[in-house]
Amino acid sequence: MLDTWPITIPQLTGDEERNVYVYVPEGYDEDARFPVLYMFDGQNLFHDEDASFGRSWRMLDYFESNDIPVIIAAVECNHHPETDECGGRLSEYSPFDFYSPHWGDVIGRGKITMDWFVEEFKPYVDDNYPTLPDREFTWIGGSSMGGLMTLYALCCYNDVFSKGAAISPAIGFSFNEVKQMIRSARIGKNTILFADFGEQEIKHPVIRKDFGEVIKLLHRKKVMLNTRILPGGTHSEESWEKEIPHFMNILLED
């Protein structure tokens, strides 16, 4: 079952509506309760017709076909250009200010986004769906800027999220800040992270170097890591769909 409805996030885009997507497994006992995977870019996860570039991750097909006992709670991204007063997706999904050669100066509002997830979205999901609300069963994931936000959530909201899937994380925009964030993070025991890049992405020497440094820092923090390079993979929803079985197997491990 996939529920979809419009919401507003006044802290970010005032009265403008965007969609929420909540997938709940069916066919279980009415007393069953499930872990929750919170995700970014909700419009790209389930249906091609909703996806920003016409191709989704097709997670609904995978979850229904494989009877995955996990709730997915996702929110549509901000579609404004970064030059708008409220900023756009890069702004909402970055914990840090940075400069983009294409967009210029981008104001990072990732903390506002994550505070909303933790203080408003998660309580609503826990109150209205059959969740297991404790940290052990509260996970987070996303791709590109959503992958960066996954790292941010595990480092800075570790009392809420115990596991994450950072798919092709956009660590290059603010790489020094990302490294400092990991160094200063207080990461609890049993924190698990799946992180990956596509083969075509990791061929870029800067991405390869940056990813290696981030993984080393996370190892030092004793994060339980599973890393993967997707053969032939690119920075695209079609590639990210192929990673669903891999990161879900990691998240579902006891």
Image (cartoon, rainbow, N blue to C red):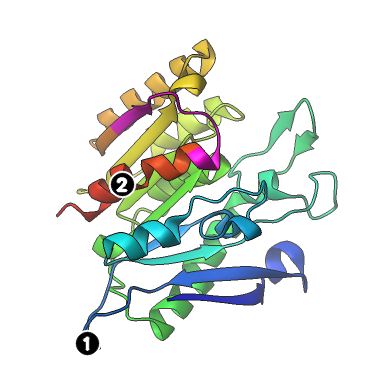
Mark carried by residue 31: 1
Query: Farthest residue in the left direction?
Result: 254
Query: Farthest residue in the right direction?
Result: 84
Question: Residue 178 at x, y = what percent?
Answer: 50, 32
Would you name the residue on which mark 2 appears? 245
Three-letter code for the amino acid on which mark 2 is drawn: Pro
In the image shown, does 133 or 197 lie closer to the viewer? Answer: 197
In the image shown, does 183 or 250 lie closer to the viewer? Answer: 250
- Residue 127 vs residue 226: left or right? right
Question: Residue 52 at x, y = what percent?
Answer: 67, 50
The CA distance from mark 2 to mark 1 is: 26 Å
- Element class at badge 1: loop
Magenta range is 227-238
| Residue contact at pointers 2 and 1, CB within 8 angstroms | no
Residue shown at the point (53%, 14%) measured from the top left: 204
- Residue 166 vs residue 15: left or right? left
Query: Taking the image as drawn, is residue 160 in sight?
Result: no
Three-letter code for the amino acid on which mark 1 is drawn: Asp
Mark carried by residue 160: none
Question: Residue 214 at x, y = what percent?
Answer: 40, 26
Q: Residues within 10 Å of mark 1 (few under 14, many from 20)?
A: few
Residue 170 falls within the magenta-colored stretch: no
For the C terminus, which image quadrant?
bottom left
Query: Taking the image as drawn, is residue 196 in sight?
Result: yes
Residue shown at the point (72%, 43%) measured from the top left: 107
Residue 233 falls within the magenta-colored stretch: yes
In the image shown, does 36 or 13 lie closer to the viewer? Answer: 36
For the N terminus, which image quadrant?
bottom left
Residue shown at the point (37%, 36%) measured from the top left: 195
- Residue 90 to residue 137: above or below: above
